[in-house]
Amino acid sequence: IKKSLYLFSFFRDPDYLKIWMENFISSYEQCLDVDFEKPPSRPEEVPPVLTLLPDNILQVLRHQLLQCVQKASDGLEAEQQHLALLLLKFLIIVCRNLSNVEEIGSCSYINHIITMTTLYIQQLKSKTKEKEMADQSQAEEFVRHALAFCESLYDPYHNWRHRTCG
């Protein structure tokens, strides 16, 4: 894993980073609990602490997310939407290890995520029925995951969801 991120830093190849994140996310898919109508689940396997992740991973992700935010106001292409969602899923998974929450929360991720979410919500509000449903589902998926990210930062024990679900 460290080697792959080193190669990304060396070659600046976002495709390689995407492959690495997709593999990481698929390993911890059960941590992506975005169904807010059901009680939260406890993952069987807790994601690793940040010190076990590749060096500079947070800086690399922050840079990629910032690029997505900067391009979002002009309208994200499908590949950039996919990257933004991967970044968001990665952050949710990492925050499921409670020892990572404080460090992730102290970074600028939440500002970027809120900016992207606001743009997606505006996009959803302005959609007409004639527009493509694929764009809408991508935006809705990002917004759901953004809510899960906020929950992982501000309510990591899912107290609010436990109360609402009974």
Image: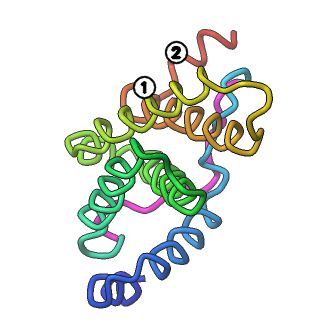
Q: Residue furthest left?
A: 106
Q: Main secondary structure of the magenta part?
A: loop
Q: Is residue 155 above or below residue 23?
A: above
Q: Residues within 10 Å of mark 1 (few under 14, many from 20)?
A: few
6 in relation to 155, above or below: below
Residue drawn at x 57%, y 40% is: 142
The single residue placed furthest to the front in the displayed view is: 130
Question: Which residue is pictured at 34% across the width and 71% down the height?
Answer: 52
Rendered image coloring scheme: rainbow
Q: In the rendered image, which quarter contains the N terminus?
A: bottom left
N-term mark: 2 or 1: 1
Residue 100 position in % (x across, y down): 32, 49
Task: Give the residue drawn at x 46%, y 56%.
Answer: 87
Question: Disc number at residue 55?
Answer: none
SS at badge 2 = helix
- Place residue 155 in its image quadrant: top left
Q: Is residue 98 left or right of residue 31?
A: left
Tag 1's secondary structure?
Answer: loop
The residue under the point 46% across, 29% down is 151
Inspect the image, locate mark 2, and give the three-letter code of the amino acid beneath it. Trp
Task: Tell me the magenta residue range.
Answer: 39-52
> Do residues under tags 2 and 1 come within 8 Å of each other at their CB atoms?
yes
Q: Amino acid at mark 1?
A: Asp
Residue on which the image places disc 1: 155
Q: Which residue is mark 2?
A: 160
102 falls in the magenta region: no
Is 41 within the magenta? yes
